[in-house]
């Protein structure tokens, strides 16, 4: 990703790596939301977050784990937003994209402090 961004924007690719103890997810110390796959709930959550133009998040989760909402998925969300497709079609289209990649979101200072720079 760093190399593709540099190819487009210029500069030097820099990657900072972090690790964290996965047991934190089930520790009960943090408010965690997990999406195991592309679902209607996931799509609505991503859509609502992308439509939020305020400085305040629309949720209060410390950590979120779920499918990545990259540019290809973003294009389908825009189609949903402009009414070209409905939610059912959105989910159908993204399920046929090549593979599924998951990501973590660390949304609070406390959650970020669980990361250890390598």
Image (cartoon, rainbow, N blue to C red):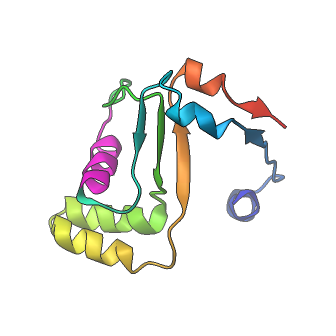
| Residue drawn at x 68%, y 63% as measured from the top left | 8
| Residue drawn at x 26%, y 69% as measured from the top left | 90
Q: 109 and 30: which one is in front?
A: 30
Q: Position of residue 114 (x, y in %)?
A: 66, 26
Q: Position of residue 71 (x, y in %)?
A: 47, 63
Q: Name the dominant secondary structure of the magenta segment.
A: helix
Q: Position of residue 34 (x, y in %)?
A: 41, 45
| Residue drawn at x 45%, y 69% as measured from the top left | 72
Q: Position of residue 2 (x, y in %)?
A: 73, 56
> Which range of residues does the magenta coloring cover?
41-53
Q: 25 and 90: which one is in front?
A: 25
Magenta residue check for 51: yes
**Horizontal placement of 55 versus 104: left or right?**
left
| Picture quadrant of residue 82 | bottom left
**Horizontal placement of 40 versus 36: left or right?**
left
In this figure, what is the number of numbered marks?
Answer: 0
Above or below, 115 against 96 in this view is above
Above or below, 70 against 17 in this view is below
């Amino acid at each position: 990703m760093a190399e593709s961004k540099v190819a487009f924007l210029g500069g030097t690719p820099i990657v900072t790596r972090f690790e964290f103890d996965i047991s934190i997810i089930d520790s009960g110390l943090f408010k965690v939301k997990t999406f195991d796959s592309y679902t209607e709930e996931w799509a609505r959550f991503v859509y609502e977050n992308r439509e939020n133009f305020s400085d305040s998040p629309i949720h209060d989760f410390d950590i979120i784990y779920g499918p990545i909402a990259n540019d290809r998925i973003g294009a389908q969300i825009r189609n949903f937003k402009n009414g070209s497709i409905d939610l059912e079609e959105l989910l159908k289209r993204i399920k046929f994209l090549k593979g599924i990649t998951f990501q973590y979101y660390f949304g609070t200072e406390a959650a970020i402090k669980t990361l250890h720079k390598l």
